[in-house]
Amino acid sequence: MNKPRHAPSVLEAFPVKKGELMIGGIPITRLADRVGQTPFYAYDRQKISERIAHLRKHLPSEIHLHYAIKANPMPAVVQHLAGLVDGFDLASGGEMHVALDTGMSADNISFAGPGKSEREIASAIAAGVTLNLESATELETAARLGEKQGIKPRVAVRVNPDFELKSSGMKMGGGPKQFGIDAEQVPAVLKCIGELALNFQGFHIFSGSQNLRPEAIIEAQEKTFALAYRLAGDAPSAVYKLNIGGGFGIPYFPGEQPLDITPIGERLNDLLEEKAKQLPGTKVVIELGRYLIGEAGVYICRVVDHKISRGQVYLVTDGGLHHHLAASGNFGQIIRKNYPVLIGNKMGSSETETVSIVGPLCTPLDILADNMALAKATAGDLVVVFQSGAYGFSASPHHFLSHPPPLEVLI
């Protein structure tokens, strides 16, 4: 049997009382009773608030902090964040409705993503949301629909830079990409925006995500500012906003360490001093998703069977990849790694067992944990998957094999 792989120290983020994990100050068994069913996602609002406060402490006060709703679009979560952040960034018309329902000013909402439909573009124009243009076609569509409405659309250019965020989980810029307009093509697009007399807002330059190396993020930010200065010379008007993306990651797997944002904040102070000379009056936006919400969320399911197959112990649960695709290893992982997982109602138990945790689906891909040393569990015990606040519920195929979907609660 392989050597067990243990969960990283991020599990210490939630307190334990009388052997039970506490989520939002509530013992996990009581929380499950309160929700009324398993599986479910639970998000701790206090942890979200603490993460925002941490950022405010270490980043320059001039930075405008935006939440990327794609990370977790649960309306209650977005409403909570509306009182903590300076704006929202969207990736769909559905997210736009969630954002506008919070009362956030449309002036502080932007809409990115390739392939926006005419309906989405028209809705964004009518709402006053800034369209981050991903192509010349989107520019033409926005101009036509704006003219039809009698509104000058607010537009920014999403730039596909000629560099990438090194060591990022997903590279969103550099080389051929479906995202944004290649940097070398941007001057022509800016000229067209001027000729069409659209309401030019600025640039969105996003080069990568899920990065735990501050030096890589700093390097990308330096290159982002330099690129913005170069492109600003062709802008049809002053650059009102510069969205420099985010890329801040969270630790998921053994050996990963939390991102140290202190050096990022320190270097940003210098970059903003230079920005004041190069682009005076330009607002600088940092757009974050998983970093704000990822560690504040857990996925909870219940053990329904403890079985042994040729010496391997399996905990079969009522949850699985249809609820949490990322934890199953089927959401971008090349080599499957375990998310941090524990038995939430048996914290500190001295009786352990090496197990694999699987769901009820008829596929060998339905694995939530493989070969992990955990407290010995039986039917009725609660499995907790940590680091589940982002790209969990909304990124999973709930209809796969027609099992019931999970619930979501903000605690």
Image: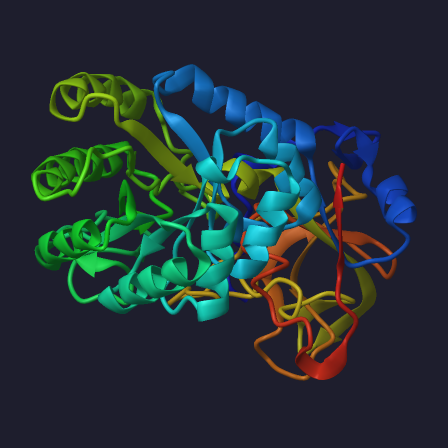
Residue for point 65% across, 44% down: 101
Q: Based on the displayed image, in which of its 4 quarters is residue 45 positioned? A: top right
Q: Is residue 276 above or below residue 346?
A: above
Can residue 12 be seen in the rendering of this structure? Answer: no
Nearest the viewer among 26 and 124 is 124
Residue for point 84% across, 30% down: 18
In the figure, is residue 146 to the left or right of 13?
left
Q: Is residue 213 above or below residue 330?
A: above
Q: Quadrant of the C terminus?
A: top right
The figure's colour scheme reads rainbow
Residue for point 11% across, 59% down: 185
Residue 388, x across and y down, in percent: 60, 49
Residue 140, x across and y down, in percent: 28, 66
Q: Is residue 243 above or below residue 57?
A: below
Residue 360, x across and y down, in percent: 74, 75
Q: Quadrant of the N terminus?
A: bottom right
In the figure, is residue 18 to the left or right of 117?
right
Q: Based on the displayed image, in which of its 4 quarters is residue 219 positioned? A: top left
